[in-house]
Amino acid sequence: MDYKIVDKPAFKVVGKALRVTTRNNEQYRRIPEFWTELSHDGSLDLLTNLAAGLVLPTHAKLGICTDFSPQTEEFTYLIAVEKPDGVLPEFLDEVDVSASTWAVFEAVGHLPESIQSVWQRIWPEFFNITEYKHADAPEIEVYPHGDDAASNYRCEVWIPIVKQASTN
């Protein structure tokens, strides 16, 4: 599985949040529905307009996975953008993303199938065969502007990592 390692300083994101379960792979159904809901209610347009004022390549929208609870098999999924300066609508949620080292995996193809396929491959094909373990930070999906239904659409999954201690 191809990946690159990236260090990124801390940053803040703003967006709208959904609590979702991983039981029966429900997240693979519910998260795409959430994107559709925010598209229909105008929230995605709002986030795109907020991101347009930032100095970001492509003004990417983000999917942030945070607050995972193994006991309840739930996590919070935030559709977001990096936080711009200025006054923001009160109904937006804010999340701090700590400075981290990230393993970045590219997904190519139409959504949501391409990114869901990458998610399903990360643990067996990356963590099980590398010296890295998951770090304590949110996981991030990066969605650049473009036609996400195209066969050549490119987006990324960013997983926070640390090197495992040597067992010698």
Image (spheres, rainbow, N blue to C red):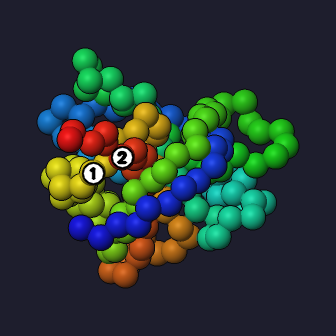
Quote the CA–CA distance across marks 2 and 1.
6 Å
Q: Residue at 65% across / 44% down in the picture?
A: 11
- Nearer the observer, 139 or 90: 139
The image position of residue 115, as x and y in percent, is 32, 61
| Disc 1 target residue | 131
Q: Residues within 10 Å of mark 2 (few under 14, many from 20)?
A: few
- Give the residue furthest to the right: 86
Q: Which mark is residue 114?
A: none
At numbered mark 1, what does the secondary structure look like: helix, strand or loop? loop
State whether residue 68 is above or below residue 145: above
Q: Residue at 69% across / 57% down in the picture?
A: 51
In the picture, which quadrant includes the N terminus? bottom left
**Kind of residue sitting beneath label 2:** Lys
Q: Is residue 34 visible?
A: no
Q: Is residue 84 left or right of residue 159?
A: right
- Labels 2 & 1 near each other (Cβ < 8 A): yes
The quadrant holding residue 136 is: top left
| Disc 2 target residue | 163
In the picture, which quadrant includes the C terminus? top left
- Nearer the observer, 119 or 146: 119
State whether residue 166 is above or below residue 124: above
The quadrant holding residue 71 is: top left
